Amino acid sequence: MWRNRVRTAATAAAVITALAAAPAAAGERTPAPPEAKAYIIAPEDGATVSSPVTVRFGLDGMGVAPAGVEQDKTGHHHLLINTKLTKDKLNQPLPSDEQHRHFGGGQTETTLDLPPGEHTLQLVLGDWRHVPHDPPVTSDRITVTVK
């Protein structure tokens, strides 16, 4: 019996991983309402902060849903740290690394340990596959200084 549970859990994990990693075919970005907007509630642009830094996410015109949940007008947050959203990143799942943080559980805030210095932060809403919507739902790119 435990073998069936292990096999079932492994199969479920493989399916979720494949969905999240599956590249979107050209032109297969999920539509978003044109008025939808992500924004960073805190910290404010230009703020001087201490680490750890709590970043709070906001979203207008859409809802938040966990990764893997395909539902109209929803997505989940990705936080870009010290990097820019390029055209190449718009048509494929966003990478998951130190510069691209995923919040596939539907989280709306995080705490970051950032070294002293200047840092940029930007939110990008991803669809159920981690692919940015069309049009992309993003925040302004803000700059904070960690003392």
Image (cartoon, rainbow, N blue to C red):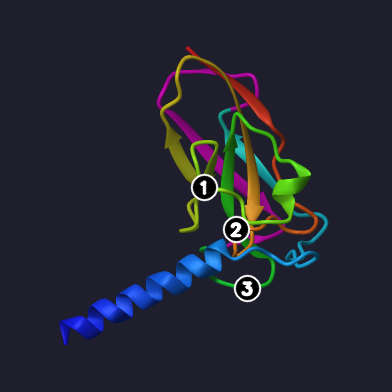
Residue 74 image label: none
Q: Position of residue 40 (x, y in %)?
A: 62, 38
Quadrant location of residue 132?
bottom right
**Which residue position is annotated with label 2?**
130
Q: Residue at x 73, y 51 (%)?
A: 90
Q: Which residues are magenta?
A: 44-64
Sequence-wise, which precedes: disc 2 or disc 1?
1
CA–CA distance in space, label 3 to label 1: 22 Å
Residue sitting nearer the eye, 114 or 5: 5
- Amino acid type at circle 1 is Ser
| Residue 22 magenta-highlighted | no
Residue 107 visible in rendering: yes
In contact (CB < 8 Å): disc 2 and disc 1:
yes
Sequence-wise, which precedes: disc 3 or disc 2?
3
- Amino acid type at circle 3 is Gln
Q: Position of residue 39 (x, y in %)?
A: 66, 41
Label 3 SS: loop
Label 2 SS: loop
Residue 71 image label: 3
**Which residue position is annotated with label 1?**
96
Quadrant location of residue 7?
bottom left
Q: Is residue 28 above or below residue 116?
A: below
CA–CA distance in space, label 2 to label 1: 10 Å
Label 1 SS: loop
- Amino acid type at circle 2 is His
